Image (tube, helix red, strand yellow):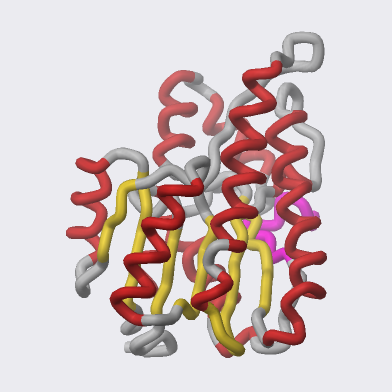
Amino acid sequence: MMTRFQNKVVAITGGSDGIGLAAAKRFASEGAHVYVTGRRQGRLDEAAAEIGHGAVGIQGNVCSEQDLDRLYQRIGNDHGRLDVVFANAGISESAPLGRIEAGHIDRLFDTNVKGTVFTVQKALPLMQAGGSIVLAGSGAGSKGFPALSMYSATKAAIRSLARTWTTDLKDRGIRVNVVSPGMILTPAMRSYLHANPGAEDGLKQMTPFGRIGDPDEVARAVLFLASEESSFVAGDELFVDGGFLAV
């Protein structure tokens, strides 16, 4: 079994299901001390049990600076440092141009952009040279999908943050990269497919591999970006989409 993260301290926002949970399981299985956040305490408790290896679930919302302070205070008290941040928490909503409302914009940008900014900024006092930050992007940040202009804009912003933060943090030896999934079978995707019979075949046809990806396939990419195996990779975006954008 690989132990790339033996005794490393890892924080994952939105770690109670989907890609965040899959990444948490992999980090923990490779020896990391894992801290995950989620908004629902019951589901968070279940996720911590699934992750095992002493994983800690801390209820919180990335839109709340106080919740983030609580997360990092606990990590600081327990370990005094933080090696990896996977800023994974995010939401998706659709609204076509002509029907976009202020609340729609606020919800998406508060969670996906402002939440990511403060997730990373508040982690920095605990991070040292060799630390790694992975941001959750999306293929939607590089392609135009109908009714997803605001969501796509938040993910394009995430891509931009990785570039600028790489220059901000290079002297500290902290790397920043983005992992951008395509069509992945997360709980949100399952709900979408359930509500839209026949959509699955269309999504598969859009992907050269002819299938929808598994959260664990994205998790493996996250661990690569967080590990020393990617020591000369910085400010980059890794697409995990079965070739959707590349082909």
Residue located at (44% from left, 61% from top): 12
- Nearest the viewer among 30 and 12 is 12
Residue located at (58% from left, 44% from top): 183
* Magenta stretch: includes residue 242: yes
- The secondary structure making up most of the magenta span is loop
Q: Is residue 86 left or right of residue 171?
A: left
Position of the N terminus by quadrant: bottom left
Residue located at (77% from left, 47% from top): 156
The magenta span reads: 237-247
Is residue 159 visible in this depiction of the protein?
A: yes
Q: Count of labels shown?
A: 0
- Nearest the viewer among 24 and 175 is 175
Is residue 209 visible in this depiction of the protein?
A: no
Specify the farthest residue to the top.
Answer: 98
Q: Is residue 5 left or right of residue 119?
A: left
- Give the image quarter of residue 242: bottom right
Q: Is residue 105 above or below residue 32?
A: above
- Nearest the viewer among 71 and 86 is 71
Give x and y (percent) for residue 232. 72, 87
Give x and y (percent) for residue 126. 50, 76
Give x and y (percent) for residue 98. 80, 10
Q: Is residue 148 left or right of residue 41?
A: right
* Magenta stretch: includes residue 11: no
Position of the C terminus by quadrant: bottom right
- Give the image quarter of residue 177: bottom right
Residue located at (77% from left, 29% from top): 149
